Image (tube, rainbow, N blue to C red):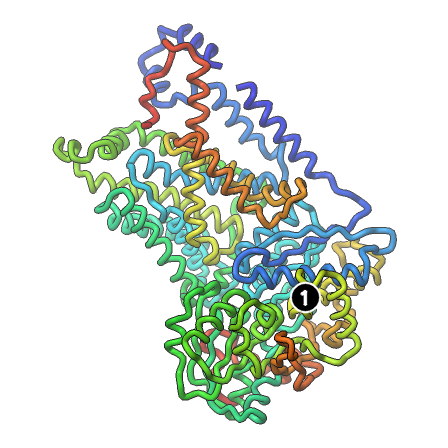
Amino acid sequence: MSKCSIGLLALSSLFLSGAAIAQEKIKVGVTATLEGTYTVLGEDGMRGHQTALNVLGKKIGDKELEFIVASTDATPDSAVRAVRKLIEQDKVQILLSPLSGDEGIAVKNFAKTHPELTFINAASGAQETTYVDPAPNFFRYNMDGAQWQVGLGKYAYDEKKYRKIATVGEDYSFIYTQVFGLVLEFCGAGGQVTNRQWVPLGTKDFASVIAALPDDVDAIYLGLGGADAVNFLNQYQQAGGKAHLMGGSIMIDQTILSSKGNAKNALVGTIAASGQADTWEDPGWQKFVKAYQDAFPPNKRFPSPSLLATNYYGSTMALILALRQVNGDLSNNQAKFREALAKIELDAPNGKIKLDSNRQAIGTNFVTEVVDDGKGALFSKVVKVIPNVNQTLGYDPAVFSKIGLPSRTVPECKKY
Amino acid sequence: MSLLQSTQLRATPPASAARRAFIRAWPEFENPAAWLVALILVIMPLIASGFFLIEIFGTTLILGTIALSLMFLAGYGGMVSLMQLTIAGFAAYMVAVFGISANTNISLGWPWWLATPMALALATAFGTLGGALAVRTEGIYTIMITLAIGAAFYYFTNQNWAIFGGHTGINTVATPHFWGIDWRTDIAFYYVTLGVAAICYFAVQYISRAPFGLALQGVRDNPRRMAALGFNVNAHRVAAYAFASFIAALGGVLQVWNYRQISPGSVSVGACIDVLIIAVVGGITRPIGPFIGALIFVLLRTFALDFLVRLGLDGNRFRLLIGLGFLAIVFWSSDGVIGLWQRWRQSQRPRTDRPDGGRGHG
């Protein structure tokens, strides 16, 4: 018995010690998908974050930034749990979170219950996060999934002469947003999307999906990511699939293009669109690629940063630059810091980024094509650069709101 | 401790029959350790703040309540049901669907005092139905059927957008406000979970000694003989499922109030098995077991990562530590931490003074 009470006393003293807060540091919580299907994405996101710290440093005036990392698995529950742990246990003042689409929606909603803290989206790209009922303390410096598809539909229709396509995508908000962007533009140009298949995140067996792919289409659009994408490509090759492919932003990305095995070779010639292109000539981009490559040994990184690394770099950059503008002043519920965040114009590696009134990024988009560099490594080559892409994709906001929110069946395949 | 207890008992031989009956029904009231634990739990908000109060102790009580429903079924009914978390998740979803949330196209917007009983009733019905399916089987087949129900529910929620909100789930679920109190503020919510957990604990304790509970334990030990004695074996089992479902549903309601959101990740097969782990680690012979198991589980889940990093190891391997802890406990004690404790107690005690052991089922 006495042992038991001593144990409890020891426990309670542990809680009390947890409450102490260091004054000279600004604590920032970071979440990344370090478990589950999107593990490689989360790991590369953290590399981008680290690259930003190498380039920009951790000093804010006389204060220093301290980062605390928590792991999630791309489910909204895990994101909310991780963010709560960071806030309540580690007492972070700012959050750099989260990585994946549904996590973003959950964290945005959670952010409303902590109006005194500031949330900077790390990489998530569901449209709903900033478009529907946005949280005043949630800032997103990357574009959403639909913005990342701008240019792809027209390019497929005009240049590649695709008329009919089918889509296969993971069954959650980010991919809905990607397909939303694609369908709007492709159908707007006159194309047809005949079949949309949705698979649960974390699907291992694609046999039934592959069997159900229609034959009478010009191309198949793949909205998959991480382990799901690699599994699909393997099984698609084994099944003898030879259709033209089109890819979403995390499908045609170094997380897949540098995966092991031959399956990825099916992707050579695939057209895609994303917030970055591996071989872009822009000096800012090249400098970032160099910094990324220098920061990690070749076997511990991808040949070139993935979209996740770029997004984490951009959001970390926004955090540090805005904090420096206000000299680390987080008083008055971080009002000054937020004002700086809202106004800041980032000279990010993947083009200029500024925020709209919903605190959503307006940025540059890239249409790309996968090429082999001759040594067996695959890269996405720039085909077209589209600056100033906003969340309503150039539509009048009133028209855009009539299209509806991205889902399995929205938007319809027609001209809006 | 044991000395204290025995002297107390000897010092009060002329206690009235009613008092003796009361003590036999509620042995906790004679146990100073139980009083101490109760006291600590009640004054916890003075000791622990924010994170520890809710993320550790609140979560422990919630998970413990859900695991308690499994303990009741497995310990007293001999039925290992892997769908207890699914029932809790179902109740959580129903609170979100009938109540108020940010997903206005799904939520019906009922006030909490209407939505919560509705959710509890539906989840209990759901669990009872599942139980009615499962009682026709025994042992591994019960596990299979209940696991199948759990897995089916997970995939259904993951892909159904009309009611369950798909992979995104349902966000910003409203929590109760009444009597001028926001019941989701840390301290108020802690007392809500503590109150519910305590009621469930005593209800299970009470039922285990009531005629129904005794008959259920008879069914567990020898269903044929019980049937020959005129007991309806299946009816007892289904009733046990109904009762356990209600407890699990209470846990589910607390869980959705805790996180204010519910999505398929919360009802995944992995999470269903977590509940089994909690119950087994704590011990399924007594109602206190699941709460002890939940505390160990929550502490491991929360601190394994930090602990590994502090040792200079790769923090990504924290799940390994949880698995090893589970293996160690099950290896050394098949009836969980409680079993360890009990054996230690018995080894400390002179041979003649051993309790008859009738309360644990072995």
Residue drawn at (63%, 48%), measured in percent from left and top? B314
Chain letter behind tag 1: A
Percent coordinates x, y for residue B156 in the rendering? 38, 62
Label 1 residue SS: helix
Which residue is tagged 1?
A309
Most extreme residue toward the front, as rendered?
A375
Work out whether B277 lies above or below B360: below
Residue drawn at (68%, 46%), measured in percent from left and top? A90
Percent coordinates x, y for residue B334 in the rendering? 39, 32
**Amino acid type for the residue under numbered disc 1:** Ala
Residue drawn at (24%, 31%), measured in percent from left and top? B221
Q: Is residue A119 visible?
A: yes
Query: Relative to the observer, which residue lies in front, A376 or A250?
Result: A376
Percent coordinates x, y for residue A194 in the rendering? 43, 85
The tally of labels here is 1
Looking at the image, residue B351 sits to the left or right of residue A348; the answer is left
Query: Relative to the observer, which residue lies in front, A327 or A203?
Result: A203
Looking at the image, residue B99 sits to the left or right of residue A367; the answer is left
Residue drawn at (43%, 41%), measured in percent from left and top? B277
Q: Is residue A392 visible?
A: no
Looking at the image, residue B343 sits to the left or right of residue A405; the answer is left
Q: Quadrant of residue B187?
A: top right
Percent coordinates x, y for residue B250 in the rendering? 41, 44
Query: Relative to the observer, which residue lies in front, B140 or A109?
Result: B140
Determine crowd level at label 1: few under 14, some 14-19, many 20+ residues with C-alpha closer than 10 A: many
